[in-house]
């Protein structure tokens, strides 16, 4: 499916938890019809230590949003 949204475009989220927020597209996942938006939909992932002397840590990851939940505001050239 062809989308009109590309990397660097300014968008507005029109539905979901982040409804009404604005952002910039950092990555387009064409296979799943999803986009990753900078500083939106950030989830935490707890990483276990690999060896006994290592420490675990918490990593913050930007998760994708389906492109039907966003609206294009300005397009980059």
Image: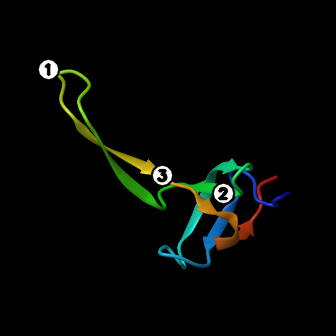
For marks 3 and 1, give the one nearer the viewer: 1
Numbered disc 1: secondary structure: loop
At 57% across and 63% down in the image, what residue appears?
Answer: 23
Towards the viewer: 4 or 43: 43
At 73% across and 69% down in the image, what residue appears?
Answer: 72
For marks 2 and 3, give the one nearer the viewer: 2
**Disc 2 and disc 3: Cα gap in Å?**
12 Å
Where does the image place residue 57, in percent across and percent down from the top left?
24, 38
Q: Is residue 40 left or right of residue 60?
A: right
Q: Which mark is residue 4?
A: none
Q: Which mark is residue 62?
A: 3
Q: Quadrant of the N terminus?
A: bottom right
Where does the image place residue 51, in percent across and percent down from the top left?
21, 21
Towards the viewer: 75 or 64: 64
At 39% across and 55% down in the image, what residue appears?
Answer: 43
Numbered disc 3: secondary structure: strand
Q: Is residue 21 left or right of residue 28?
A: left
Q: In which image quadrant can residue 74 be found? A: bottom right
**Disc 1 and disc 2: Cα gap in Å?**
38 Å
**Disc 3 and disc 1: Cα gap in Å?**
29 Å
The residue singled out by tag 2 in the image is 34
Q: Which mark is residue 53?
A: 1
Residue 70 visible, this orientation: no
Q: In which image quadrant can residue 69 be found? A: bottom right
**Mark 1 Cα within 10 Å, few/some/many (few <14, many 20+)?**
few
Q: Is residue 62 above or below residue 56?
A: below
- Name the colouring of the figure: rainbow
Q: Is residue 37 left or right of residue 5?
A: left
């Amino acid at each position: 499916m062809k989308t009109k949204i590309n990397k660097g475009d300014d968008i507005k989220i029109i539905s979901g938890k982040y409804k009404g927020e604005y952002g910039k597209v950092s990555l387009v996942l064409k296979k799943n019809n999803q986009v990753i938006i900078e500083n939106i939909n950030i989830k935490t992932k707890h990483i276990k230590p690999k060896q006994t002397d290592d420490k675990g840590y918490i990593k913050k990851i930007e998760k994708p949003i389906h492109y039907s939940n966003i609206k294009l505001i300005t397009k980059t050239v």
